[in-house]
C-alpha cells in the first residue's frame, strides 16, 4: 500500500521537497553554529556534537515528514474540507515537534551523555523552543504539496478538455466530409446521365473518371489534411468529367507552382467551389466559359482563387449551396476564425472566389 502511494508521488516534486528540506536543515545548522560562535547558547555542545545533533534531529524528522506527505497525498485524494484539513495538519505539526523533541532529548542524554533529567516540563520547554521552526518547515512543505497537486489537477483538466475538443473536431470534420461525398456523387451522376443522351462512349469515360475520383476521395475520408498535390489530383478527375460533358464550351486554366504542391490543405476544398463556378458561370449570354484555379503563398497563408468569366452575381448577399457551405464549415472548424472567404464580381466579367487559410508548418 505504502509503495503504491510512493509511486503516486511525482519524482520532480519529491526531489524539490528533499532539496527544500536540506536547505531548511542547513539554515538551522548555520543558525546554531552562529549561536555557538557568538556564545549566546549551545555552549555545552562540542562542534562535532552540535553538527551530529542537527543531522540526527533533521534526519529523524524527515522520516516523520515523509509519512506526513504520504498521508497528505491520500488525504488530498479524498477531498476533505478546508477547516478539517487545517485542524489535522496543525495536529500533525504539533506531533512532529513533540516527536522531534523527545527523540532529540533522548539522543542528547543517551548518546551524547548529557545529565539533564527528561520530564514533562523539559519536553514542553523543548517543544515550545522548536515549534516555530517546525511549524514553518512543515506547513511550507504541505503548502508546496497542495499547490503542486492543485496546479497538476488544473493542467490535467486542461489536457483532458483539449483532447476532448480535438476528438469532437475530428468527429465533426468526418461528418462534414461524409456529407460532401453524397452531394458530389448526386451531382456527378446527374451530369453523366445528361451526357448519356448525347454520347454513350463519353459517358462511359465519365463513369471511369468518376470511379477513380470516388476511390481517391474514399482514401482520404478519415484525414483532416492532404497535400495540395493530392487535392489537385482529385480536382483534375472532376474536371475530366466536366470536360466530357461540356466539351469545347468549358475550358480550365490551372496556375499552381510545383514548389507548393506539398503544402497541407483540407481535402475537397477546391472541387465544390469549381463546381459552383461552372454551375453559375453559364447563362444565356455566356455559353462558353473559362474556369481559372490559382493557388499561391502569401506570407504565412495559402490563397485559393477560383474564377470564371461567365455570368456575374445578381445580388450583393450570396446564398451558398450545400457544397460551399460544407467547405466553409470545415475550414471554420479547422482554423476557427483564422481564415477568410470572399466571393465577388470581377471587374470585367465573371466571379472571383477567394479562400485564405494559414499554412501548416511541421
Image (cartoon, rainbow, N blue to C red):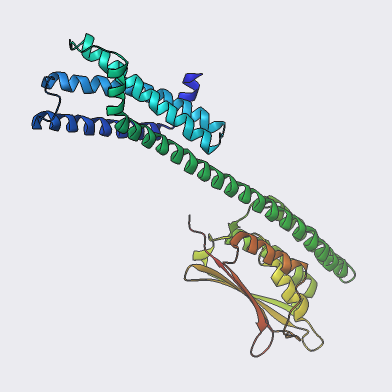
In the image, is 344 to the left or to the right of 54? right
Residue lying at 55% horizontally and 47% vertically, measured from the top left: 158
Task: Determine whether, in the image, residue 61 is placed left or right of residue 6.
Answer: left
Q: Is residue 62 above or below residue 273?
A: above
Q: Quadrant of residue 356?
A: bottom right
Q: Is residue 16 visible?
A: yes
* Residue at 55% from the left image edge and 36% from the top image edge: 81
User: Whole-percent x and y of residue 214?
Assistant: 74, 56
Name the residue: 65% across, 53% down: 169
Instruction: In this rendered view, identify the residue nearer to me: 74 or 164.
Output: 74
Residue placed furthest toward the front: 121
Residue 154 in the image: x percent, y percent?
A: 52, 45
Query: Can you name the residue that lies furthest to the right here?
Result: 197
Foreground of the two, 256 or 352 = 352
Q: Say above or below: 175 vs 301.
A: above
Q: Residue at x 62, y 54 (%)?
A: 224
Quadrant in the picture for residue 124:
top left
Camera-side residue of 305 and 54: 54
- Is residue 9 visible in the rendered image? The answer is no
Q: Position of residue 355 (x, y in %)?
A: 61, 72
Q: How many marks?
A: 0
Horizontal and vertical percent position of residue 162: 58, 49
In which quadrant of the rendered view does residue 189 lie?
Answer: bottom right
- 50 and 18: which is toward the camera: 50
Q: Is residue 57 above or below residue 213?
A: above
Amino acid at each position: 500500500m505504502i509503495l503504491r502511494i510512493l509511486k503516486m508521488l511525482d519524482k520532480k516534486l519529491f526531489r524539490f521537497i528533499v532539496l527544500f528540506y536540506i536547505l531548511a536543515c542547513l539554515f538551522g545548522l548555520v543558525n546554531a553554529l552562529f549561536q555557538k560562535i557568538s556564545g549566546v547558547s549551545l555552549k555545552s555542545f562540542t562542534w562535532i556534537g552540535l553538527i551530529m545533533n542537527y543531522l540526527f534531529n533533521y534526519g529523524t524528522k524527515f522520516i516523520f515528514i515523509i509519512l506526513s506527505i504520504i498521508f497528505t497525498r491520500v488525504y488530498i485524494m479524498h477531498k476533505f474540507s478546508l477547516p478539517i484539513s487545517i485542524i489535522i495538519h496543525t495536529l500533525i505539526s504539533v506531533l512532529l515537534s513533540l516527536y522531534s523533541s523527545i527523540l532529540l532529548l533522548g539522543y542528547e542524554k543517551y548518546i551524547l551523555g548529557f545529565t539533564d533529567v527528561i520530564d514533562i516540563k523539559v519536553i514542553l520547554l523543548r517543544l515550545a523552543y522548536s515549534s516555530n521552526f517546525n511549524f514553518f518547515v512543515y506547513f511550507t512543505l504541505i503548502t508546496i504539496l497542495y499547490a503542486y497537486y492543485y496546479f497538476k489537477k488544473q493542467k490535467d483538466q486542461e489536457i483532458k478538455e483539449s483532447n476532448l475538443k480535438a476528438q469532437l473536431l475530428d468527429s465533426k470534420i468526418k461528418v462534414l466530409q461524409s456529407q460532401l461525398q453524397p452531394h458530389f456523387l448526386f451531382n456527378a451522376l446527374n451530369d453523366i446521365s445528361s451526357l448519356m443522351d448525347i454520347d454513350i462512349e463519353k459517358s462511359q469515360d465519365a463513369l471511369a473518371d468518376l470511379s477513380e475520383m470516388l476511390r481517391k476521395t474514399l482514401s482520404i475520408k478519415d484525414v483532416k489534411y492532404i497535400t495540395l498535390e493530392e487535392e489537385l489530383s482529385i480536382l483534375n478527375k472532376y474536371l475530366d468529367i466536366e470536360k466530357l460533358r461540356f466539351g469545347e464550351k468549358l475550358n480550365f486554366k490551372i496556375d499552381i507552382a510545383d514548389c507548393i504542391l506539398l503544402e497541407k490543405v483540407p481535402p475537397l476544398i477546391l472541387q465544390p467551389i469549381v463546381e459552383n463556378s461552372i454551375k453559375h458561370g453559364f447563362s444565356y449570354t455566356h455559353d462558353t466559359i473559362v474556369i481559372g484555379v490559382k493557388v499561391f503563398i502569401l506570407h504565412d497563408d495559402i490563397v485559393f482563387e477560383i474564377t470564371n468569366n461567365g455570368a456575374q452575381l445578381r445580388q450583393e448577399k450570396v446564398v451558398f449551396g450545400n457544397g460551399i457551405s460544407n467547405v466553409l464549415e470545415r475550414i471554420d472548424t479547422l482554423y476557427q476564425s483564422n481564415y477568410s472567404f470572399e466571393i465577388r464580381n470581377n471587374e470585367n466579367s465573371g466571379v472571383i472566389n477567394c479562400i485564405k487559410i494559414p499554412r501548416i508548418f511541421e
